[in-house]
């Protein structure tokens, strides 16, 4: 029962933060929340216990905050370009000359979620090196059919 409650809580947190991301919540806070929810789900899937869920949430919080807070506009444009036109399973790397942060992104093949056949989604592995510390995270982005922009889902 605790496992189900943890999964429901994580899913609710993900949905509530994704809906408020453009309503005054900072990138770091939104990233931390989404990272916590994703980490909790991953921790539960791997460890099948409360301890693994909490550890996944803690790790996800840190990684989500770092990536959400540290990616500036130029980095987000580069990430959008990766989702838009980079070949699947081919790493794309760059270093931000202003921040010194570097990123390596490995996009996966596009797919269409069952509920929406108009907006493709892609998963990607992101290795972000911020202040000399490498952090790996996994994201999913779906294309907004009106703007063509890729919107991070987790």
Image: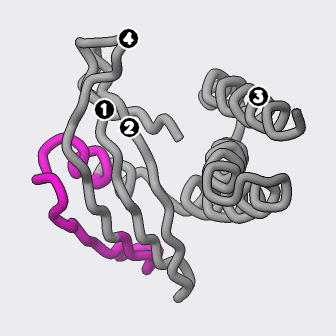
Who's the residue at 25% across and 45% down the image?
A: 83
Q: Residues within 10 Å of mark 2 (few under 14, many from 20)?
A: many
C-beta proximity under 8 Å, tags 1 and 3: no
C-beta proximity under 8 Å, tags 1 and 2: yes
Residue 129 lies left or right of residue 112; in this view the side is right
Who's the residue at 71% across and 49% down the image?
A: 40
- For the residue pair 43 and 19, the one nearer the viewer reads as 43
Residue 7: percent from left, percent from top: 74, 35
Assign a secondary structure to mark 3. helix
Q: What residue would you read off at disc 1? A: 121
Assign a secondary structure to mark 2. strand
Q: What residue would you read off at disc 2? A: 141
Who's the residue at 65% across and 45% down the image?
A: 41
Query: Which image quarter: residue 116?
Result: top left
Find the distance from the CA under tag 2 to the CA under tag 3.
Answer: 22 Å
Who's the residue at 29% across and 40% down the image?
A: 122
C-beta proximity under 8 Å, tags 4 and 2: no
Q: Which residues are magenta?
A: 78-103
Residue 28 visible in image: no
Assign a secondary structure to mark 4. loop
- For the residue pair 2 and 62, the one nearer the viewer reads as 2
């Amino acid at each position: 029962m605790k496992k189900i409650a943890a999964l429901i809580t994580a899913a609710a947190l993900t949905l509530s933060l994704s809906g408020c991301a453009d309503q005054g919540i900072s990138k770091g806070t939104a990233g931390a929340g989404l990272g916590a929810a994703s980490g909790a789900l991953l921790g539960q899937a791997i460890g099948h216990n409360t301890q693994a869920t909490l550890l996944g949430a803690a790790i996800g919080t840190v990684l989500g905050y770092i990536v959400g807070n540290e990616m500036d506009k130029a980095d987000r444009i580069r990430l959008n370009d990766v989702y838009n036109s980079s070949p699947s399973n081919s790493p794309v790397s760059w270093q931000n000359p202003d921040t010194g942060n570097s990123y390596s992104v490995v996009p996966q093949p596009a797919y269409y979620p069952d509920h929406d056949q108009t907006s493709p989604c892609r998963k990607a592995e992101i290795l972000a090196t911020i202040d000399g510390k490498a952090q790996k995270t996994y994201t999913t982005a779906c294309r907004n059919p009106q703007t063509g922009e890729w919107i991070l889902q987790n």
